């Protein structure tokens, strides 16, 4: 129950950066088979290699939606190399809640999709174990 | 019926609240008698079966084979050798697929199943269809979650095999098996039944149904995990080939060939799950004492009560039939705008355990047009006050999460 903190509920009910980018530099999508949560992400990267804009779309539980919303806020203005190196701990610390193994996947789905967009932008394959 | 006291786990608390367990369709809790049977076995006569001459092995073999007799009697099998012990329903269906259907099916043959199946009764047939270049066809459901019987009548004529669930683990729908098997047999089509959600909850009589293959799991009927059952009608036993090879299933082994053990042991390769099969025997004793008709009546009453109560919860949609006579002890639902994982999480904070997700029935959920469901399922230890707690919990879910 503690996981529905005010912060989480706020991002769930009023998600930031939800929608699509018209001409994204990169996009990716993934879903969580156990619950059907689906996240799509568009990212716009400028000539300096900085994340200028990012939007997410999709449906899912409060945790996956809030996590996606917070994650987008975290990466805007960051260099893609820093986003590529970003560790999941950073996101989990920002979420500020303790999650069990099952709900951890909900929280990390947006993280995985973000990494997919970056790796695909760099022409690389995501080899990092996310879950 | 008040048997809660027989189940030690139901005394525990979750998040400071008494546990209310509404996930028996996934796995049931175990009564003390079953747990004791395991301890007694390990402390007193743990030994491998069918091999030793010593006392322990004699006792273990005797208890193991007694469990087989109990299972045979429980589902009214004509003969004891029609009972094959496996791990679970999935393994049983795979056994029929490998041991029987693999030789029986030819190219372009149709395997007929339904859209309400658990993955365990879809994926093995998908694999076989691919291997044999056969076809897998599905019978659709009505908006009430019942099988479209006119569709069945049309499709069964051209099918070669029927694989069907007795009771849906999502909709709760109890299918009119007897009638369907009769029609299938008119065209000489063998029928495989997934009885994982029926055998634990109602009287199932394999001779009355005239079913050819029937699969179920002990762990959903008070028994330990690891003891599942495949029933094979005698006339198919000789046509069936072993699907696992090695120890115990042989009669004679030479360097270049081997011959098979007698029925049913030729289908039970390697050391069996001895303790858990003995535990299944203890579970059957427990259920027989209550009586399967009483089990069904109890659940029917609970379902009726729960459907009434839940129909008053605003924004709640229930999937499947709402007639308790056509429904097993399962209610799947969604609250508009709230993900079932969140429903389950908040209920858990009240000590209430329900299932959320795809319930191993992705094609059905797709057919229903939902990505996930919440599911409450009942068994003998549940009471009307558990239903009341669920309803109260759902109000809390809405309060926490409504936008």
Image (tube, rainbow, N blue to C red):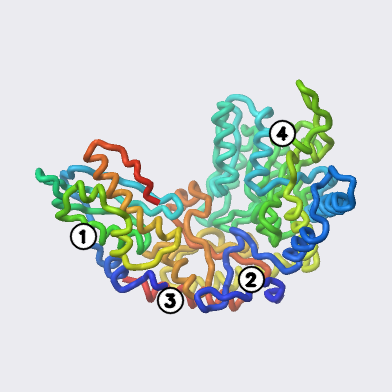
- Image check: B402 left or right of B268? left
Q: What element carries label 3?
A: helix
Q: From mark 1 to mark 2, how far is it between C-alphas?
A: 44 Å
Which mark lies nearer to you, 1 or 3? 1
Residue B79 location, quadrant: top right
A127 w.r.t. B71: above or below:
above
Q: Nearer the viewer, residue A45 or B74?
A: A45
Q: In which quarter of the image is the N terminus of chain A?
A: bottom left
- State which chain disc 4 sits on: B
Q: From mark 1 to mark 4, how far is it between C-alphas?
A: 57 Å
Q: Nearer the viewer, residue B275 or B134?
A: B275
Residue behind mark 3: B396
Residue B293 visible, this angle = no
Residue behind mark 1: A73
Dots 2 and 3: beta carbons under 8 Å?
A: no
Q: Residue at x 16, y 44 (%)?
A: A23
Which mark lies nearer to you, 4 or 3? 4
Q: Is mark 1 on a helix, strand or loop?
A: helix
- State which chain disc 1 sits on: A
The numbered mark at residue B9 is 2
Residue behind mark 4: B245
């Amino acid at each position: 129950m503690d996981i529905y903190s005010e912060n989480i509920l706020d991002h769930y009910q009023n998600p930031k950066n939800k929608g699509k980018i018209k001409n994204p530099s990169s996009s990716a999508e993934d879903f969580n088979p156990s619950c059907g949560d689906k996240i799509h992400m568009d990212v716009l990267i400028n000539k300096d290699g900085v994340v200028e804009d990012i939007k997410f779309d999709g449906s899912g539980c409060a945790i996956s939606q809030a996590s996606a919303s917070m994650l987008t806020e975290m990466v805007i203005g960051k260099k893609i190399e820093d986003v590529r190196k970003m560790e999941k701990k950073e996101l989990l610390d920002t979420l500020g809640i303790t999650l069990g193994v099952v709900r951890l996947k909900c929280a990390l789905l947006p993280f995985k999709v973000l990494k997919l967009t970056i790796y695909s932008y760099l022409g690389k394959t995501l080899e990092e174990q996310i879950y | 019926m008040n048997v809660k006291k027989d189940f030690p786990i139901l005394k525990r608390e979750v998040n400071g609240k008494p546990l209310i367990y509404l996930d028996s369709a996934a796995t049931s809790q175990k009564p003390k008698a079953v747990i004791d049977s395991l301890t007694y076995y390990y402390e007193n006569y743990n030994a491998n079966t069918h091999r030793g001459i010593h006392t322990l092995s004699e006792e273990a073999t005797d208890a193991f084979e007694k469990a087989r007799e109990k299972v045979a009697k429980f589902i009214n099998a004509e003969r004891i050798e029609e009972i094959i012990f496996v791990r679970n329903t999935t393994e049983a269906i795979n056994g029929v697929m490998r041991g029987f259907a693999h030789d029986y099916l030819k190219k372009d043959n149709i395997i007929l199943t339904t859209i309400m199946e658990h993955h365990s009764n879809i994926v093995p047939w998908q694999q076989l269809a691919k291997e044999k270049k056969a076809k897998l066809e599905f019978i659709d459901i009505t908006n009430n979650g019942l099988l479209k019987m006119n569709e069945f009548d049309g499709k069964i004529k051209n099918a070669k095999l029927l694989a069907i669930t007795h009771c849906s683990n999502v909709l709760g729908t109890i299918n009119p098996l007897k009638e369907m098997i009769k029609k299938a047999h008119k065209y000489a089509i063998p029928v495989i039944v997934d009885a994982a959600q029926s055998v634990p909850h109602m009287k199932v009589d394999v001779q009355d149904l005239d079913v050819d293959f029937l699969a179920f799991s002990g762990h959903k009927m008070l028994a330990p995990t690891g003891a599942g059952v495949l029933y094979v009608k005698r006339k198919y036993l000789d046509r069936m080939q072993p699907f696992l090879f090695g120890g115990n299933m042989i009669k004679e082994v030479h360097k270049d060939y081997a011959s098979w053990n007698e029925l049913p042991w030729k289908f039970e390769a390697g050391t069996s799950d001895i303790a858990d099969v003995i535990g299944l025997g203890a579970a059957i004793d427990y259920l027989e004492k209550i009586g399967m008709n009483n089990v069904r009546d109890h659940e029917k009453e609970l379902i009726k009560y729960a459907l009434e109560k839940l129909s008053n919860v605003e924004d709640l949609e229930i999937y499947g039939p709402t007639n308790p006579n056509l429904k097993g002890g399962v209610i799947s639902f969604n609250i508009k705008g709230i993900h079932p994982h969140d429903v389950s999480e908040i209920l858990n904070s009240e000590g209430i355990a329900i299932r959320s997700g795809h319930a191993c029935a992705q094609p059905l959920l797709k057919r229903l047009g939902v990505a996930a469901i919440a599911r409450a399922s009942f068994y003998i230890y549940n009471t009307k006050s558990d239903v009341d707690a669920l309803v109260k919990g759902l109000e809390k879910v809405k309060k926490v999460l409504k936008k």
